[in-house]
Image (spheres, grey):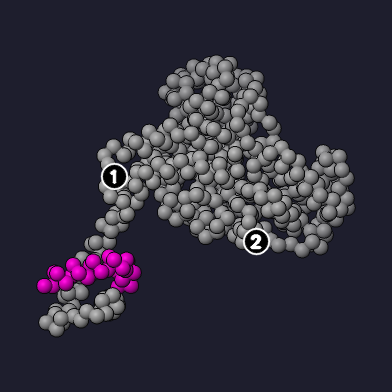
Amino acid sequence: MTLTYLCFLKQILKRNHCIDSIISKFSFRTLEASLSCLVPHKKFPSSFLPGRLAFLIFLFIILTQETPLLAQQYLKSVPESGFEKRITDYIDTIRIIDNHEHLADPQIVKQLDLLDFMLLLHQYNYNDLISSGLPKSNFDKLFNQKLPPKEKWDIIAPYWEASFNTANNRLAVLAARTLFGVDDINRSTVDTLSARIARAYQADWTGHVLNDLCRIDYLIQDGDDKILGVDNIKYVKRFTSWLTVRSKYRIDSIAIEQVNPILTLEDFVLSLEEEFNSAMNRGVVAVKVNMAYYRTLKIDNVKVEEARRVFRSLRNGDEDHVLTYSEAKPLQDYMFHRLMDLAQKNSMPVVFHTGLHSGNGNYIANSDPSLLSNIFMRYPEIKFSLFHGSYPYGGELSALAKNFPNVFIDLNWIYAISPSYSERYLHEWLETIPVNKIMAFGGDFRCVENIYGELLIAKQVISKVLISKVGQGYFSEQEALKIAKMILYDNSKLFYKIL
Ligand SMILES: [Zn+2]
């Protein structure tokens, strides 16, 4: 009879989803109170009372043993066999929207002295080489001089040996292997790899990699220069000159470029508006804010008098005089709000650099996405996207995107930073954030080889996470496929209003 009674209680507890709360608050007294609350009309049998303590211990053991099982017993039944391959195949062949690149014009790349194996290592890999100890004084030799590949290799060899482990450097090897048939990057392969890279660029290599291999339908470029000869590129626009202004020289440079004097704060705001309207006319799809490279993302509400005071101190100062960031902050913050006014008025999405900075040596705390909370509240009509999975602020990012309807997240670049961070947080973000607000790919690279390498890793991570979640019964197979399409295509199409 006791066992029957226990089963009955377990069913009620399961139905009421109260097990965790009961266990977390566990004490014999609270457990008993919780039980009587769940089954108020059920009296404990009088014959049962003497053994009440033993019963409660027994019940506690059963319930605590049940908890890990329940964590696996999600909503979906066991998937049909072969679901792992079907999900992987679907993701391998899906068309995607690439949310963020700094693509170098292939016509220019063709002419570069850089067209050797260092092409694959010229961006974040170079940052890792510097991080491992490579003196920066080697930059010119590596990237601006036509040295034999082996000579370049000899410069980086000790630092490559010290940093071959990073995801950036693994990704370059992956690109060398999959695109050029060279299994490793080392002294004996750099000549072959360099020759194959140079040969590839004789044809439409960029178009081939983006369209045929990556299956990218649209690529969103962060850069002002138009890339010719590559289809379906959309652009974001930066307004860094206004958002990080600290000198008279900067103001005068804008005035000269726009052929319009900037003598007052109102003129300065008008110059921002002119730049914004011109970008709108060119069809840009978002405002890009990268101020975290220069200063904190904490943006205050500033009175116009305060901004005017800073503007006047610049206007009346010497051409060479440069304010500190804290001195210039009121004017910069004021201009940021004017930019948001324009974005809001024109329904233009705004994307932020958050988390790790490229390059070497910066203040990571400046790019903590939670510093932006007041901005998300103040501009509820603007859609914000937070880039780079905010590495290493994945938990903060999760809370922000869950909490604010206008905050979206973008995983661009994080597969090259850390595949395991991407995997760990994609798991978490798929549990916390409405899936329509997750955008899953952008390479953040200048050359297509690394975009391809990163996409391979991204697809592995996304497949692995979705397969795991289907295996656990968290999603059905159909839901996993739907999510893959949403995070790799549909969500970006809607966010950037790509028609
Ligand atoms: Zn970028």
Question: Residue at image x 65%, y 61%?
Answer: 378
Q: Main secondary structure of the magenta part?
A: helix
Q: On residue 152, which mark appears?
A: none
Mark 1, residues whose alpha carbon is within 10 Å: few (<14), some, or many (≥20)?
A: some
- Return the residue at label 2: 378
Q: On residue 79, which mark appears?
A: 1
| Disc 2, SS | helix
Q: Nearer the viewer, residue 336 or 145?
A: 336
Left or right of 185 on screen, residue 148: right
Q: Are marks 2 and 1 in contact (CB under 8 Å)?
A: no
Left or right of 380 on screen, residue 423: left
Q: Position of residue 423 (x, y in %)?
A: 42, 45
Question: Residue at image x 48%, y 34%?
Answer: 95
Kind of residue at disc 2: Arg
| Disc 1, SS | loop
Kind of residue at disc 1: Pro
Q: Which residues are magenta?
A: 1-26
Give the alpha-carbon distance from disc 2 to disc 1, as whole Å. Answer: 45 Å
Residue 309 vertical placement versus 453 (above, below): below
Q: Position of residue 270 (x, y in %)?
A: 81, 49
Residue extending furthest bottom?
46
In terms of image quadrants, where is residue 432?
bottom left
Query: Does the Cβ of the disc 2 residue fall within 8 Å of ligand 1?
Result: no
Residue 53 vertical placement versus 132 (above, below): below
